Image (cartoon, helix red, strand yellow):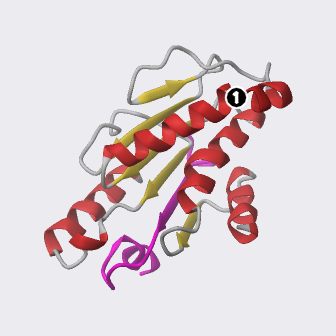
Amino acid sequence: MDAIAEHLQAVSNGQIHKLLINVPPGHMKSLAVCVFWPAWHWIHKPHWRWLFGSYSAHLSVRDGNKMRTLINSAWYQRHFGGKFELAKETEPYISNDKTGFRVNTSVGGVGTGERVHVVVNDDLIRANDADSPAMREQALKHMRAMSTRGVDSDVFSQVLIMQRVHESDPAGWALE
């Protein structure tokens, strides 16, 4: 967790623009990257725009809802309230009053019309689909499309988090 937090901080500081995190299931990678990090980042830069994708919209919406719950919590509001306020949400968007937003999407879902500061792709392919060349290509097509969504090339960052499921999975493509 310390290594993940250190690297996410480097992305927030503009020191890293492409980050790959390969961690097995059950190690808090989605909570750390898709819930805690953007909620923390908005404390400092509430105008930032985010796009979160997964193989299923259910997962990115789930994490968006967790982020909203965290931001609305008494603890968060006591410590960081006043930095920004959440605007009225319309799924798959979460936005704030400082022009920042979060889009929750999936492979093949919404997002290509948005310009963002950060794209986070979390498990773009299910382990059960890893042996399917068509499913791997669909995940890679999503990654390539989202890589063109930057609002500002000086700060645009891409984060890919996943367990390794195949030599030619999105992580393998990114490493290549």
Against 149, is 30 above or below?
A: below
Q: Quadrant of the N terminus?
A: bottom right
Whether residue 151 is visible: no
Disc 1 marks a residue whose amino acid type is Ser
Report which quarter residue 162 is drawn in: bottom left
Residue 96 percent location from the top left of the image: 60, 21
Q: Nearer the viewer, residue 89 or 51?
A: 89
Q: Nearer the viewer, residue 82 or 114?
A: 82
Residue 78 lies within the magenta run: no
Which residue occupies 49% across, 64% down? Answer: 161
Whether residue 62 is visible: yes
User: Does residue 80 appear to the left or right of 46 in the view shown?
Assistant: right
Report which quarter residue 86 is drawn in: top right
Which residue occupies 55% across, 49% down? Answer: 34
Q: Nearer the viewer, residue 96 or 118?
A: 96
* Magenta residues (range): 149-176
- Which residue ends up furthest to the bottom in the rendered image? 167
Which residue occupies 78% across, 36% down? Answer: 44
Residue 117 percent location from the top left of the image: 56, 42
User: Does residue 82 appear to the left or right of 154 in the view shown?
Assistant: right
Against 123, is 68 above or below?
A: above
Against 138, is 100 above or below?
A: above
Residue where numbered disc 1 is placed = 73
Against 159, is 84 above or below?
A: above
Q: Quadrant of the C terminus?
A: bottom left
Q: Secondary structure at mark 1?
A: loop
Residue 95 percent location from the top left of the image: 54, 24
